Image (spheres, grey):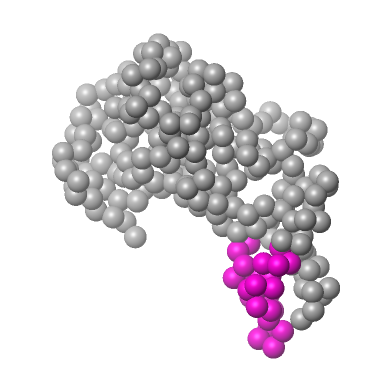
Amino acid sequence: MNRQRLKPIVEAALLAAGAPLPVDNLLRLFSDDERPEPGEIEAVLTEIETDCAGRGFELVQVSSGYRFQVRQELAPWISRLWEERPTRYSRALLETLALIAYRQPTTRAEIEDIRGVSVSSTIMKTLLEREWIRVVGHRDVPGRPALYGTTRHMLDHFNLKSLDELPPLGELMDLDKAHARLQRDDGADLGDDGPQLSLATAAVSDLAQDAVAEDAFAGESDDLPLRDEHAADQPTSDRVTVIH
């Protein structure tokens, strides 16, 4: 199939899909006698990406494949299409998500140990319902606490191809200065580098926790005083039961 015919088919598929499309899915659009090589699809995608320069939308590659999305700088105007107030995520939720992303697989008790406060059930429920995290196994200790890891859906939402794109912990901004940038709306997939920065700056590492004052978390409605009932979740072994 020639390039002039192939390009509009790929564009139409990306517009109609409503979700990121990997190259393999694009190849399945064609019958055996007309199927292009993977390299031809990739070349067309590169050409489409170039064509989007200067337009209100762009072609980006995320963990699940390629998609069209509105450019981040246009979000203030485009968000007015919806009357409901955009969802805003609390600092506690973003810190919890970032800790899971950087330390996975990890337990709820390990997250609480780093943050110094209990992770509310509402936060874990929200992350699970949004399919940003999932249970990947259970640690073989008393209580068999769940081990959490991030999902491809989370990577897609924050415009990441893989966890390797997260900045090193040593490059994270000061937590208090970053807090203003963490209050993002539910249109995070409108942007390119902003969501990645927001997720990264929410992380709290072992190296940084001593520099964070205990009252930095005061007033967070998502946080509760650390409870003894999670003591059984504390790891005493590296044994892990993995869920496939």
- Please say whether residue 131 is visible from this viewpoint: no
Q: Position of residue 148 (x, y in %)?
A: 36, 44
Q: What residue is drawn where x is 60% and y is 46%?
A: 159
- Please say whether residue 190 is visible from this viewpoint: yes
Relative to 225, residue 233 above or below: below
- Residue extending farthest to the front is 170
Q: Which corner quadrant holds the N terminus?
A: bottom right
Q: What residue is drawn where x is 72% and y is 48%?
A: 69
Residue 155 within the segment the image draws in magenta: no
Q: Position of residue 196 (x, y in %)?
A: 56, 39
Q: Position of residue 231 (x, y in %)?
A: 20, 29
Quarter location, residue 83: top right
The residue stretch that appears in magenta: 21-45
Q: Image check: 132 left or right of 135?
A: right
Quarter location, residue 190: top right
Number of marks in the rendered image: 0
